[in-house]
Image: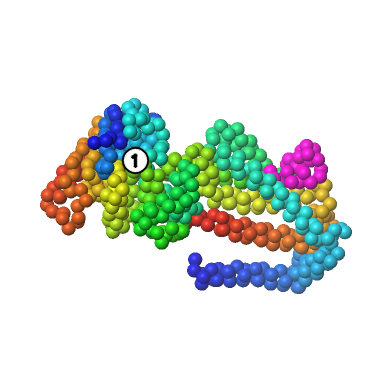
Amino acid sequence: MNSKGKKKYWLITVTTWLILFVVWQIATSFKMVPEILLPSPEKVVSTFVKLSEYGYNGIPLWQHFLITMARLLSAVVLAIITAIPLGLISGRIKIVYSIFDSIIQFIRPIPPLAYYTILILWVGIGETSKVVLLYLAAFAPIYLACISGVNRVKDDYIKSAESLGASSKQVFFHVIFPSALPDIFTGIRTAVGMAYTTVVAAEMVAATYGIGWMIINASKYLKSDVMFVGIIILGITGVVLDQILKYVERKIVFWSGR
Amino acid sequence: MEKIIEVKDLTVTYENDDKPTLNSLNLDITRGEIVTVIGKSGCGKSTLLNTIAGYIEPTTGEVLLNGKPVTGPNWKLGVVFQNNALYPWLNVADNIGFGLKMRHFDKDAIDERVDTLLDQVQLTDKKKDYVFSLSGGMRQRVAIARALANQPQLVMFDESFGALDEFTRNDIHDVILDLWKSLHLTFFIITHDIDEAIKLGNRIMIMTPDKGSQLRVVENPYFNINSADIDSDYMKFKNDILTQIV
C-alpha cells in the first residue's frame, strides 16, 4: 500500500474512533443511558486522575497495572521458552507429536475458568496459580504455530541444506527454525492475546490487586467509572503490546511474505 | 574417461504405485561432461535426479559416486532447484557460504571462496543484499554459486531455468557454459526445453515413458550453438528428438 492509501485508511480509523467518542458523549450528556451503565467520558477521565493520585483500595494504580503485566509477561515468557522447542520437535518427530498433541488439543478448547479451581487446589492460591492459568492459555497457540511452521518449511530448503553438507542438527537450527519463525511470531501474538483475555479471569479469584481484580472488585459496587478506566487501560495496553510485537516481528522476520 | 556417476539397473517404484517410475535404468556420467536429460512431464526425470542426489532410495539397483554407493545427500553432489531454494533470512554472501559454514570451514576461507564465486557469477555488488531483493536470474546465479561453493564433483540442475524468461535464461546458459569451461566442471541438467537440452548438453539423454523410463543417448553436434547458427539441419535434429519424446 502506498503512503496515500495508508493515510486514507488511517483517517477512516481515526474518524471511526471520533464518531464512537461523540456518540458516547451525546448519549451521556443527554442522559440517554443511566450513568451507572455508561459513565460520561469526563467522569471516566476524572476517575482515572483520581485513581492515579490515590490508587484503588489503597494500592496505587501503577502497581495494579504492573502486577497484571508481570503476571501476563511471566506466563508468556514461560510459554515461549517451553512451547517453541516442544512445538518444533513435535513438528519434526512424529513420536513426540503423538505424545503431546492430543493432550494439548484436549486442553486448548477448555475455558480457563473451568479448571482454575483445580489449579488453585494443585498449586496454591498465590501467584503461581494465576501465572499457570495464563501460561496454559498462552502455550497452545505457540505450540500449534510451531508445528504449522515446521510443516510449512519448503522441502527444497531441507534438501538443499542436506546437499550442502548440513547434518540433521544443523538443518534443524539453520533451516527449520528460521524458516518457521514467521509462524512462531504469529503464534506468540495470538498467545499474548489469549493470555490477555484470560488475565481478568485469573485475577477474579483470591487476588487483591491487578487491573483485572480492580474491574471485578469495582463491578461488585457498581463503580462503572472504575470499570471503564480498567477496561480502557487493558484495551490500550493490548494494542500497544501487539504493536510492539509487530515491530519486533518486522525487525526479526524481515523476509516474511517477500 | 573417468566415470563420476554410475547408475546400475536402477528401479524406483513409489509406494502405492503399481508401475515403476524408473525401470532398470543404466547411465554413466563422466568427468567434465554436461549431460542433459529431456523428457515429458511425469516421465521420471526428477526421480532420476533425486535418486542420484541421494534424496530417494532405489527400490533395486544402485547409484555409485566414484565407485561407492550413494546412501544419502552428499556435499559432493550439488543441486540447483527450480525455485532456487535460497534462504531469504540470509544475504547473498551467507547463502553462497552456507555449505562451507556447515562443513566448519574457517571464516577467511569462506569469505575468499564466496568472493571468487560472486566474481564468477558477476554479482560482486550484490554481496550484502538479501535474496528477495534480487531478480529471478540473479537468484539462480546465487543458487549456482552456492552449489559450486563446496566444489562438488557433479552439479545437478532440476529444471532450474524453467521459471525464467527467455533473455534471462540465455544469460544463465552463458554463465553455466563459462563456469564449465573455466572450472572444468561436470553438470547433469534436467530440462523440458529441447533447445536448452541441445545448447547445454555434450550428450543428450531422452527419457521415454514407455515400459518404465528408459534413456536413449544422443550425441549432440549442436552443443553450445549460437541462435544465429540455427539452420534446417538443427531443426531436423530437434524434430528427431521431439518425435522420440512423445
Give x and y (percent) for residue A191.
64, 49
Q: Residue at x 76, y 38 (%)?
A: A118
On screen, residue A228 above or below A186:
below
On screen, residue A8 above or below A130:
below
In the figure, is residue A81 to the left or right of B122? right
Q: Residue at x 66, y 58 (%)?
A: A241
Q: Residue at x 35, y 58 (%)?
A: B122
Tag 1 subunit? B
Quadrant position of residue B60: top left
Give x and y (percent) for residue B191.
29, 45
Disc 1 marks which residue?
Answer: B153
In the figure, is residue B118 to the left or right of A119? left
On screen, residue B224 above or below A123:
below
Q: Mark 1 belongs to which amino acid?
A: Gln
Which class describes the residues within 10 Å of circle 1: few (<14), some (14-19), or many (20+)? some
Give the camera-side residue of A57 and B180. B180
Give x and y (percent) for residue A208.
84, 52
Q: Residue furthest right?
A: A58
Res B36 visible: no
User: Magenta stretch mostly in which secondary structure?
Assistant: helix
In the figure, is residue A122 to the left or right of B216? right
Magenta stretch holds residue A104: no
Q: What are the residue bounds of the magenta stretch? A: A114-137
Give the camera-side residue of A186 and A89. A89
